[in-house]
Every structure is written in C-alpha cells, then in structure tokens.
Image (cartoon, rainbow, N blue to C red):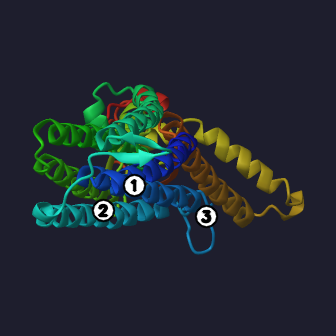
Amino acid sequence: MAQGSKKAVLYAICVNGIITVLKAGAALVTHSAAMMNEAVHSLMDTLNQIFLLIGLKRGEQPADRQYAFGHGQKKYLWNLWSAIGLFSIGCGLGLAHAWHAWHKLEHFERPDAISILGFEIAPVWISAVVLVIAFVLEGYVLMVAGKEFLSRMRAEGKRNPFKYLASADDPTLIAVLLEDSIAVTGVILAATGIGLTQTTGNPIWDIGFSVLIALMLGLTAIFLGKINMRYLTSIRDHDAERIFQDILKQRREIERYHDLRSVIVDDTHTVVVAEVEVREEVLMLYMRERIASHAQELLARVPEHRRTDAVVDYAETRATIQATLEATEQLIDSLEAELKRRCPQVFHLTIEVEGIADPSQLDDPKAIQTGDLPKER
C-alpha cells in the first residue's frame, strides 16, 4: 500500500513544483488574482506532498524500545500538520490577496499586451497556455492516484468510490487524490474567472473566482484534518472485529465471547483484544491420550525404584496442566492464524480465556465423548 502511495506522492511533488513556477510567472506578468491564488494553491500542494513523503518515510520505521508497534502513526501526524497548517495558510493568503486585488481595483490597470522575446502577447493567452499545461499535468497525476485508489477499492471488494473515500485506511493516498481533484477544479475555476473577465471587461470575475479557489483550500484542510484525526484517536477496525466474530461463531471450542475491541495503529497494523469462554467437552477430546503421553515422558526421567506414589501423582498433575495449556495455546494460535489469514492488517491478537462454560449435557455420554454439544444461546 505504502509503495503505491509513495509513487503517487512523488509524481505529485514533481508536477506541482513545475506548475507552481509556471502559475507564479503567469500571475506576475498578467496581474491575475485567480492565477496568483492558483500559484499559491500549487505551492501549498507541493509543500503538502513533501510533508506526506516525510510522513511515509517516518512511518516505515520498525518497532523499537520506545515505539512498541512501530512509527506508523507518525504518518498521520505529518499529514495532519500538512492539512491543517499548509492549506489553512494557503486559504488565508488567497483570501488576503483577493481582498488586496479588490481594494486596489479602481487604481490598477492591467496591461493590454506583454512583450516576450520581441513578441507582443495578450495576457489572456499567457494565462491560457499555462492553465492548459497545468490541466494536462494535474490530470495525469490525478489519473495515477485514481488508478491506485480504484485498484485498492476493488481489491477490498468495495463498489462505491465515495463511501470508500470517506472510510479508506490510507489518508496519504486520499490526500493526494483529493488535492489533485481540487487542483484540476482550481484550474477550471481560474480559467472561468479569467475568461469571464476577458469577455466582460470586468475584473471582479477574476477576483471572485480567486476567492472560490482560496475557500477550496480551506475546505480541503478541514476534510483532510478530519480524516487524519480519526487515526490518531484509537479508532476501531470494524472489519477486523466482524471477521473475528465470524471466526469465533464457527468454532465449536468457543462457547461465547465478549469485550471484543480493536485499535488501528496504522493502515497495516491493527490490534485486536477479546475475552472468550471455552467449552471443556471440546478441549477434553483426546485429552486422556495427551495426559498419558506427558505423564509417561515425565516418569521416564525417573528411575523405576524412585517412582513413589507422590512422584506419580506429581507427574499426572503436571501432565494434566501441561496438556490443558497446550490445548488452550493451540486454540488461541489457530484463532490468531485464521484471523491474520482473513484480515492481513491484524498483527497482534490478545485473547483472554476467561473461563470454562458450564457443562450443558452431562447426561449425554456420546455428546461428551465427541464434543458435539450445542452452544448456549
């Protein structure tokens, strides 16, 4: 997952860096408020994606003495700083520039033509060329992020992209996808504002659409901040819990379970905790053979002439405990293996065996011998 996100982030950094320079240059020579806000937008996108890349790098560090479950949550922290900080700044700068442009509107004249390499070019054509280049490049990056997003959605068996966007477990990919979508939208808004200004001769259209671009940055900050906050507040993994419930219900060794909880550490690490009660009649299957085998192994270490009744009692008691622990450990190991097979993001499972359920059919010897007793309802 992280590799696909990193690829999308690297593409976005390169493309947005180029577009920032182009838009800023066009804004300086055309004096377009919408183009300037688009330059700020692209600059914030570039810085944001650098933050995302740093977060991905930091989040890949393995567990150590200080971070028992790895550094995965650092990714969400960097994403949060990026979303709230950079996009809020971008929104503020955009609104401030729009206000400044509106305030100076009556005292400012836009150039009719700009001289470039001896050619007189109308400002609208400079803006048009830059916006077309930006649209193509931003569209390509959006396509890369969109392919990764859709491939993950299909891999997880989801069909509704909007629901998956709100619940996906990789905020980095969501951030890139959302930023690129808004970047393409921003280019369209800037082109609309500049086009209406050119058509009507009224620069208020340019300023008005620059305000919309700035507000988009603010809404992006709120949405991305909300997504990353979820993973910094011990959010539950409902898919892992549902799958584990299905596993427990299918296992006849388990009478009942309760206090099932989970915590998402990051997009590839989930911790699951549960308490279970086991059915003794199922654990008792083949228990006699196990106890006899362990007792025989213990007594084999003691010379024949020293096998007193106390030694034999100790060996049988210890063999009973050992066989019971082995059966319980095998049950827990099998539950963990099944959960990790069906839910790969689970990397730690803690099961507390709370006790043994009350016997349900002691008057049915056949059921006791086979362990085929109904669960309590």
Marks 1/2: CA–CA distance = 14 Å
Contact, CB < 8 Å: mark 3 with mark 1? no
Quarter of the figure with residue 80: bottom left
Of the pair 250 and 215, the residue shown nearer to us: 215
* Residue 256, picture quadrant: top left
Alpha-carbon span between mark 3 and mark 1: 43 Å
Q: Amino acid at mark 3?
A: Ala
At a point 58% along the width and 75% down the height, the residue shown is 66
**Can you identify the residue that label 3 sits on?**
63
Q: How far is mark 3 from mark 2, CA to CA? A: 35 Å
The percent coordinates of residue 71 (x first, y second) are 54, 63
The answer to whether residue 322 of the structure is visible from this angle is yes
Q: Circle 1 sits in a helix, a strand or a loop, which is it? A: helix
Q: Name the residue located 34 percent from the left edge and 37 percent from the top edge.
A: 125
- Residue 341, above or below 35: above
CB atoms at circles 3 and 2 under 8 Å apart? Answer: no
Q: Which residue is mark 2?
A: 90
Q: Position of residue 242 (x, y in %)?
A: 33, 39
Q: Amino acid at mark 2?
A: Gly
Identify the residue under disc 1. 24
